[in-house]
């Protein structure tokens, strides 16, 4: 059984940023990343035409930490001969499709450190060595690790009213493209429902209007209507590195007050351009007397079930939250859940521990609310009387570290730096080994440059 200094669970943007940091800081230890997907990708089910990333392109995988890195988004454009074409677009934010290409482009540089198509089934302590983890894959392979960085992404939130529904017809947006394509191949879609009032929900409604020109689209949300996202420069300070320290040190009540004030910087709100585009299209449909998008706002869903003896069609029973009026939305072919993701917590729609860490719960410290206690350096602490090797959460710490951990690229690079520094300290890497490795790499780099400059083959 092979032993690695670092095993990363997941190889999305968070752990890609860590891989860059490990390389650029010349970490001499061994590392391996395990990714369940068959290859590098980012949000493959939500690469909708015209959608953008909602953050400045330089808040990428590395620039805030090292703007001279070869792995910046700008260098990606240069190396792919698209810099001036991109600058000439005049867009505030890059297209999501192009940013997905950027993420995959960077990931390809680290292909030798990643095993794709490898889902992790469990993580436990080595019963024979308290300084090691054993990572077990779904294929049954076991790998030892001196430290583990968990970055599997957040768990999709499936409201309980949909828990028993047919997953082929009722699915989270993280499965949008594949599920919709499968249904559309079997039979033309006549009626699709989108649940939610978020940015993703609005983008899905817009996309479905064009993708399924003969279908009716019902959009059910608790809110009165789509709310404009708070993009004030002052509110955007939640994505500054200083805010992480501020938020982390707040009391529970302080965090709650901040969350209430800043909720619409990231949740239950939509960018102005998307709202304007959706509203204009709905208005145009009205002019043409072809109102295909129907909004069921201020509504909560009471039930979801199969409609009579029809061929798999569904119906929703909804209640208007202000008047109490109950109505049915019938003859639905597919329901897309734009219902968000679970955060760490003990409330409705939250989880006290990521599923991958369930086997370690008894060894890990929890706070007074029963949630995993996360240190400022994103590490998890051992419960009193227990010992746990270095273990980190990369991108799952919104409840403790604030909105920079809410799936945004904004602080990925700096979080990777913090995790790297703590990992190096906790692993207690031998300084002589580190210095020797640095010298060897510098010598190899010098040799390559001499060969390139002189055109000679250096033996």
Image: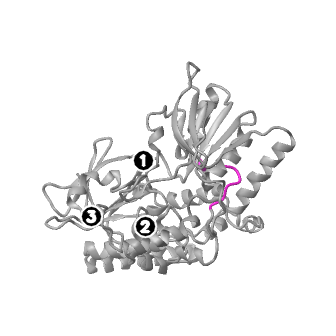
123 vs 385, nearest the viewer? 385
Q: Nearer the viewer, residue 222 or 342?
A: 222
Disc nearest the viewer among 3 and 1: 3
Farthest front residue in view? 323
Q: What secondary structure do most residues of the magenta stretch adopt?
A: loop
Q: Nearer the viewer, residue 257 or 101?
A: 257
x and y, in percent, of residue 413 in the image? 49, 71
Q: Residue furthest toward the top?
A: 309
Which residue position holds label 1? 36
Q: Tell me the CA gap for discs 1 and 2.
A: 18 Å
Q: Tag 1, which secondary structure?
A: loop
Residue highlighted by disc 3: 366
Give the residue displayed 48% in from the left and 81% down from the top: 242
Q: Is residue 273 left or right of residue 42?
A: right
Percent coordinates x, y for residue 262 in the rendering: 54, 70
- Where in the figure is residue 291, as x and y percent of width and height? 78, 40
**Quadrant location of the C terminus?**
bottom left
Question: Residues at badges 3 and 1 in contact (C-beta under 8 Å)?
Answer: no
Residue 230, picture quadrant:
bottom right
Residue stretch rendered in magenta on the structure: 46-53
């Amino acid at each position: 059984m092979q032993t690695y200094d670092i095993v990363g669970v997941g190889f999305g943007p968070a752990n890609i940023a860590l891989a860059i940091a490990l390389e650029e800081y010349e970490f001499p230890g061994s590392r391996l990343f395990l990714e369940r997907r068959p290859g590098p990708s980012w949000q493959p089910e939500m690469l909708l035409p015209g959608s953008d990333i909602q953050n400045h392109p330089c808040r990428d995988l590395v620039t805030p930490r090292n703007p001279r890195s070869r792995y910046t988004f700008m260098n990606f454009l240069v190396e792919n001969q698209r810099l001036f074409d991109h600058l000439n677009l005049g867009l505030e934010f890059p297209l999501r499709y192009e940013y997905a290409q950027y993420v995959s482009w960077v990931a390809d540089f680290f292909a030798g450190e990643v095993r794709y198509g490898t889902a992790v089934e469990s993580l436990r302590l080595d019963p024979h060595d308290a300084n090691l983890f054993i990572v077990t894959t779904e294929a049954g392979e076991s790998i030892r690790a001196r430290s583990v960085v968990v970055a599997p992404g957040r768990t999709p939130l499936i409201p309980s009213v949909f828990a028993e529904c047919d997953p082929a017809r009722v699915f989270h947006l993280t499965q949008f493209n594949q599920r919709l394509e499968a249904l559309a191949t079997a039979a033309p879609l006549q009626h699709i429902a989108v649940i939610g009032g978020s940015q993703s929900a609005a983008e899905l409604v817009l996309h479905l209007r064009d993708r399924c020109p003969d279908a009716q689209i019902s959009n059910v949300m608790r809110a009165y209507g789509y709310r404009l996202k708070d993009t004030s420069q002052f509110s955007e300070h939640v994505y500054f590195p200083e805010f992480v320290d501020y938020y982390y040190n707040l009391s529970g009540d302080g965090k709650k007050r901040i969350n209430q004030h800043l909720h619409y910087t990231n949740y239950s709100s939509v960018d102005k351009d998307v709202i304007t585009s959706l509203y204009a299209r709905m208005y145009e449909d009205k002019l043409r007397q072809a109102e295909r998008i129907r909004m069921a706002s201020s509504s909560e869903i009471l039930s979801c079930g199969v409609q009579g003896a029809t061929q798999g069609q569904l119906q929703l029973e909804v209640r208007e939250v202000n008047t109490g009026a109950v109505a049915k939305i019938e003859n639905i072919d597919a329901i897309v859940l734009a219902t968000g993701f679970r955060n760490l917590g003990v409330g409705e729609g939250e989880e006290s521990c990521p599923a991958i860490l369930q086997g370690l719960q008894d060894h890990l410290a929890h706070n007074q609310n029963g949630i995993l206690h996360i240190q400022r350096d994103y590490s998890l602490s051992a419960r009193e009387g227990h010992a746990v090797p270095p273990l980190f959460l990369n991108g799952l710490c919104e409840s403790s570290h604030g909105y920079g951990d809410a799936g945004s690229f904004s602080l990925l690079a700096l979080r990777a730096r913090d995790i790297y520094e703590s990992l190096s300290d906790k692993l207690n890497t031998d300084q002589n080994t580190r210095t020797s490795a640095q010298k060897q790499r510098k010598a190899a780099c010098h040799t390559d440059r001499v060969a390139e400059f002189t055109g000679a083959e250096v033996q």
